[in-house]
Amino acid sequence: MIYELILILISLGILIISADQLVSQADIIARRFNFSQVLVGLTVVAFGTSAPELMVSISAALFETPPASDAIIGNVIGSNIANLFLVLGVSGILFNISFNNIDQKTNFYLFVVTTFLIIILSTSTNINWIHSFILLLLLILFINHLKNFSSNVEISELKQASDINFIKLILSFLGFFIGGKLFLSESLAFFTSIGIAHTVIGLTVLALGTSLPELITVIIAAMKKKAAMGIGNIIGSNIMNILFVLFPSIVIVHMRGYNFSSLNIQSSDLILLAISTSIIIILGLLKKPLNKALSIVFVLSYLIYVYRLF
């Protein structure tokens, strides 16, 4: 137990250092190429903090026989719920969280991608090739949206980015991968040994573990006065979890000749995902800040949700 605790603490330290470097180096590179903080949050930072979800899901799809479809879907849904209720909730308690820099098209993609996933899981027990094709189409459209994303960085604010900045950025990705894997492996071994179902592990342990990078990154971004990057990270991570994490996992499972089952996902999980996403989209459309009262409600809702799962 002490050994596992030490490893979990070490993994948290790696994640904190990685998040600090990710925000710093991404900001320098963004200014060098005249990118906005929101765009960097939606892409570079979101990709980095989604690395643990990608690692867990690809491993479950590629190396488990049969593939652990329940754990993959549970990981994605649970991570997205945790990102919105836990990560934004905790961040909203500590800092002022504003959605002013999130454009309507980005909110639209969050809505469409999340709604499509909920419809699939509500109406089908298996995710098939047709669903995969639609996810691929949404992925292409989202990439095109990012390509046409306008910058709001003034020319006078540009900074030079050297090779060392890119190296540090890559090392921060590596740190997320190692720290996330270490945290998850130690946590998974413990909870599996006491007989908790894969779906519950995916919705809680995997989701919480893979959402730690987002939580740490948003907090550090806010501390560094880069809150727009942190909010972009959350929105981007939730979109990426579906398009860049779930979609490749589905393709791998199908290529191995298995059905991608979604039989064990509960309606309560989908309802909470729908509620949390809707609240964030509404706040974004109305340009309303996430106040402390609502942030506390978010965190309490998440804790109650996790408690009921067990």
Image (tube, helix red, strand yellow):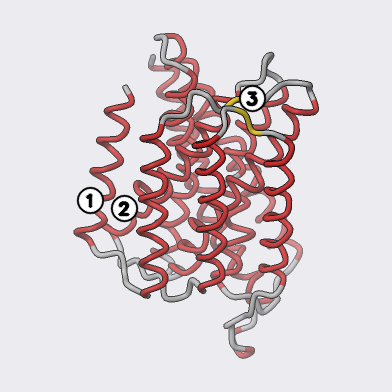
Task: Check disc 3 and report its element: helix, strand or loop.
Answer: helix
Q: Which mark is residue 151?
A: none
Give the left or right position of residue 149, taking residue 230 as reference: right
Task: Check disc 2 and report its element: helix, strand or loop.
Answer: helix
Residue under label 1: 297
Q: Quadrant of residue 241?
A: top right
User: Could you say where residue 178 lies in the image, as x and y percent from the top left?
Assistant: 60, 35
Give the left or right position of residue 130, taking residue 101 as reference: right
Earlier sequence position, callout 2 versus callout 3: 3
Amino acid at the residue labelled 2: Gly
Earlier sequence position, callout 2 versus callout 1: 2
Tell me whether circle 2 and circle 1 mark residues in contact (CB < 8 Å).
Answer: yes
Residue under label 3: 60
Q: CA distance from mark 1 to mark 3?
A: 33 Å
Q: Which mark is residue 89?
A: 2
Earlier sequence position, callout 1 versus callout 3: 3
Tell me whether circle 1 and circle 3 mark residues in contact (CB < 8 Å).
Answer: no
Vertical comparison of 43 with 68: above or below: below
Tell me whether circle 2 and circle 3 mark residues in contact (CB < 8 Å).
Answer: no
Q: CA distance from mark 2 to mark 1?
A: 8 Å
User: Could you say where residue 34 lies in the image, as x and y percent from the top left?
Assistant: 66, 79
Amino acid at the residue labelled 1: Val
Check the image and name the residue furthest to the bottom. 156
Q: CA distance from mark 2 to mark 3?
A: 29 Å
